[in-house]
Image (cartoon, rainbow, N blue to C red):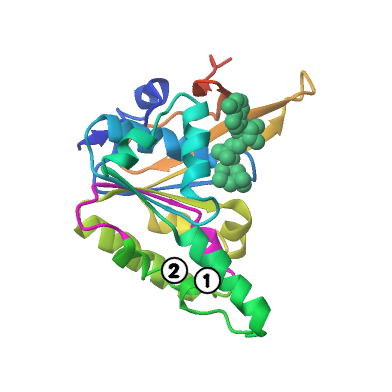
């Protein structure tokens, strides 16, 4: 099976070379644990490798994301300028829409707020690599059944187009949906901050829960976020 490098060489070495081609990986985790940064590594690496990339960002605007990536040694703006990286402004639309709701007192949640399948139309035709961060925002008004049906359709649609995807879903939304998202995707990784019982200090860990067709580490990987982004620490 063809693999795409994750942008973190040490991680690639532990998961058979990278993320499986034409499949969807899910990235879950608590707030501030490193989901977006992990996703940015993959996006940047894919840009470097000459892939046509797209990001659907629901929580941050493209400028902030590119600034964050640059501060971690991943200059994305170059690819954005030459249009090999497209960043969708769904964040702006969501916030503008909420402003209209508040201004005019409309109470329904519209299409944009609960249309996961519609994301397929927002992925540029030529995209080979897609990062969606964070799909959780579309689930606020959804039942687990509705979510599963829409999420499966999105994943199937991307696979049919040979897109290799990383979908971020925050832990709170994942739990609200009963954890079913993990069954739809090819692989699941979870980032967390955990207290080390020996030192009492908090550490970041990356737990690889599954990648079909791939040997994965049994134990969570400790990591740090440095000026070069995510660095996997030597395992004890
Ligand atoms: N340049 C940097 N150097 C060191 N650590 C950094 C740097 N930039 C960000 N971080 C750390 O990364 C964390 C955020 O990581 P990230 O945005 O990937 O988390 P997340 O899981 O996506 O969070 P959210 O819930 O906001 O989406 C910050 O809280 C900060 O501790
Ligand atoms: Mg994030």
The residue lying at 30 percent from left, 67 percent from top is 121
Quarter of the image where one finds residue 206: top right
Q: Is residue 119 magenta?
A: no
Q: Is residue 155 left or right of residue 226?
A: left
The image quadrant in which ligand 1 is located: top right
The residue lying at 34 percent from left, 44 percent from top is 212
Q: How would you rate the neighbour count of disc 2 (Cα within 10 Å): few for under 14, some for 14-19, many for 20 or more? A: some
Q: Nearer the viewer, residue 28 or 100?
A: 100
The residue lying at 38 percent from left, 53 percent from top is 185
Q: Secondary structure at mark 1?
A: helix
Instruction: Please provide percent x and percent y for residue 19.
Output: 32, 37
Q: Which residues are magenta?
A: 123-140
Which part of the image, by quadrant, shows the N terminus?
Answer: top left
Instruction: Please provide percent x and percent y for residue 105.
Output: 67, 85
Instruction: Please provide percent x and percent y for residue 20.
Output: 28, 40
Q: Is residue 131 magenta?
A: yes
| Disc 1 target residue | 144
Do callouts 2 and 1 mark residues in contact (Cβ within 8 Å)?
yes
């Amino acid at each position: 099976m063809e693999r795409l490098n994750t942008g973190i060489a040490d991680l690639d070495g532990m998961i058979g070379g990278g993320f499986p081609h034409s499949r969807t990986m899910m990235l879950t985790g608590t707030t501030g644990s490193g989901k977006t940064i992990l996703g940015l590594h993959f996006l940047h690496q894919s840009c470097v490798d000459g892939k046509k990339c797209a990001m659907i960002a629901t929580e941050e605007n493209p400028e902030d994301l590119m600034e964050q990536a640059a501060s971690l040694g991943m200059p994305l703006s170059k690819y954005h300028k030459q249009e090999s990286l497209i960043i969708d402004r769904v964040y702006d639309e969501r916030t503008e829409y909420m402003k209209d709701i508040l201004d005019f007192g409309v109470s329904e949640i519209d299409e944009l707020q609960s249309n996961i399948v519609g994301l397929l139309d927002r992925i540029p035709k030529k995209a080979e690599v897609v990062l969606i961060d964070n799909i959780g925002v579309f689930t606020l008004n959804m039942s687990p059944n509705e979510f599963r049906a829409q999420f499966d359709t999105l994943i199937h649609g991307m696979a049919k187009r040979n897109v290799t995807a990383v979908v971020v879903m925050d832990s709170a939304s994942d739990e609200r949906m009963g954890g079913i998202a993990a069954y739809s995707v090819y692989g699941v990784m979870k980032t967390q901050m955990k207290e080390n019982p020996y030192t009492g200090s908090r550490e970041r860990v990356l737990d690889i829960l599954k990648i079909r067709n791939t040997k994965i580490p049994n134990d969570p990987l400790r990591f740090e976020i440095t000026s070069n982004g995510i660095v996997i620490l030597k395992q004890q």
